Image (cartoon, grey):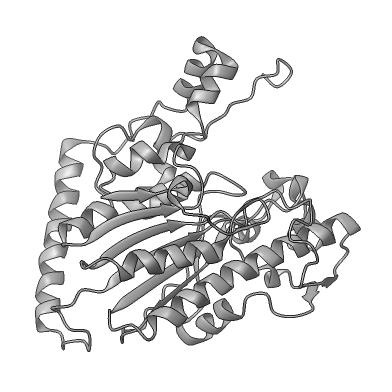
């Protein structure tokens, strides 16, 4: 396929069919669409699982009824803001590398306050919509064929998600993404997931850009504006774009964060510093949200995490040169290395008291 010039364009099926033709594009999709029936799958197994869920739900309701009332009024439901930050990761985890200053002061402060939690992502370097699929629906990519893209191949009718759950609770469920709505077919998929509205880049008014894309600060401003102008409590699922790769060009001009140490080549050093600058902007956009909602009379919760690790050079160049992994051959990674290459920071913040939860890996 590679020698024939075939490129499987999974993020845009219109382009996939235009470039590869009907027969080949169809065949490429079919190989990723056949879900094998698990050996343990049966009506009896499903009935047993459903009974367990029902019993757990009853116990949860009973437990909530007898628990002490939280400081948050039950009458006033909190806004819930998810921020899935594009390729967000903590570059200070490269222990052999030192930065001139901390690029992620907000994240590191929240980690000290509420614990360092991580999201175990099914992706590396791309495939954002698959992470979105897992988070929004609770379904796992591990049950699907390798290479499949649920947003492209499976979601063509209503599917329960966080968006539909919050909508059922009287919330306005809204998706915000600072890129075009056709990307990963979100225009169609978000409707099936139960989002009431979707604000993609086409609906941003004179947005600030930074580097190649709309800035994370601009996204934060849009989130604040949507919450402040809406009467109902909101569930907002936000996907950013500023720090999307590639990072080969120093697209922010002079980078604030200088990396030293390790065995970084000049190219790897430049890639890492460009990435760190974008990660810092993401960190500061989170701080912007916190600064606004800490003084708000609306109870608000923010969940912030990265969708996957960034692709820092070809063949894991930066990770290898910095000693984060032992080899560029992913097939030879240890289990710990696989885990490291799929773990993104996850932090939460709220302007009301919440019990601390210790979930090291989700």
Residue 44 image position (x, y, % from top left): 15, 40
Residue 68 image position (x, y, % from top left): 16, 88
- Residue occupying the far top of the picture: 23
In this view, the residue in front, 336 or 355, is: 355
Q: Tell me the residue at 32%/68% (across/down).
A: 227
Q: Quadrant of the N terminus?
A: top right
Residue 332 image position (x, y, % from top left): 71, 48
In this view, the residue in front, 122 or 113, is: 113
- Residue occupying the far front of the picture: 206
In this view, the residue in front, 155 or 262, is: 155
Q: Tell me the residue at 43%/44% (across/down).
A: 141
Number of marks drawn: 0
Left or right of residue 198, residue 62 in this image: left
Q: Quadrant of the C terminus?
A: bottom left
Q: Picture quarter containing residue 8?
A: top right
Relative to 45, residue 78 above or below:
below
Left or right of residue 60, residue 331 in this image: right
Left or right of residue 273, residue 9 in this image: left
Left or right of residue 355, residue 331 in this image: right
Residue 362 seen in the current view: no
Relative to 106, residue 41 above or below:
above
Residue 337 image position (x, y, % from top left): 65, 58
Residue 278 seen in the current view: yes
């Amino acid at each position: 396929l590679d020698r024939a010039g075939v490129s499987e364009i999974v993020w845009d099926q219109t382009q996939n069919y235009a470039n590869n033709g009907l027969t080949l594009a169809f065949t490429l999709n079919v190989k990723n669409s056949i879900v094998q029936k698990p050996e343990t799958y049966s009506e009896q197994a499903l009935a047993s699982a459903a009974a367990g869920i029902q019993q757990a739900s009853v116990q949860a309701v009973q437990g909530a009824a007898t628990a002490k009332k939280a400081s948050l009024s039950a009458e006033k439901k909190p806004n819930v803001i998810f921020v899935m930050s594009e390729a967000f990761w903590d570059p200070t985890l490269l222990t052999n590398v030192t930065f001139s200053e901390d690029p992620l002061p907000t994240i590191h402060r929240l980690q000290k306050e509420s614990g360092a939690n991580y999201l175990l992502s099914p992706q590396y370097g791309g495939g954002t919509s698959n992470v979105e699929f897992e988070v929004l629906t609770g379904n796992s990519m591990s049950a699907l064929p390798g290479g499949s893209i649920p947003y492209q191949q499976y979601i063509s009718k209503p599917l329960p998600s966080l968006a539909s759950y919050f909508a059922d609770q009287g919330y306005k469920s809204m998706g915000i993404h600072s890129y075009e709505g056709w990307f990963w077919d979100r225009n169609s998929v978000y409707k099936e997931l139960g989002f009431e509205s979707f604000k993609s880049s086409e609906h941003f008014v004179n947005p600030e850009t930074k580097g190649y894309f709309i800035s994370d600060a601009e996204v934060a401003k849009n989130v604040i504006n949507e919450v402040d102008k809406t009467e109902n409590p909101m569930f907002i699922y936000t996907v950013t774009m500023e720090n999307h790769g590639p990072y080969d060009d120093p697209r922010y001009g002079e980078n604030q964060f200088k990396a030293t140490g390790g065995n970084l080549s000049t190219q790897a050093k430049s890639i890492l510093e460009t990435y760190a600058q974008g990660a810092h902007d993401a960190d500061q956009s989170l701080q912007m949200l916190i600064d606004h909602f800490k003084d708000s009379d609306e109870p608000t919760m923010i969940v912030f995490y990265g969708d996957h690790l960034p692709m820092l050079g070809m063949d894991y160049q930066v990770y290898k040169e910095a000693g984060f992994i032992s080899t560029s051959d992913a097939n030879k990674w240890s289990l710990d290395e696989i885990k490291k290459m799929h773990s993104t920071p996850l932090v939460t913040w709220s302007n009301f008291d919440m019990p601390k939860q210790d979930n090291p890996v989700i």
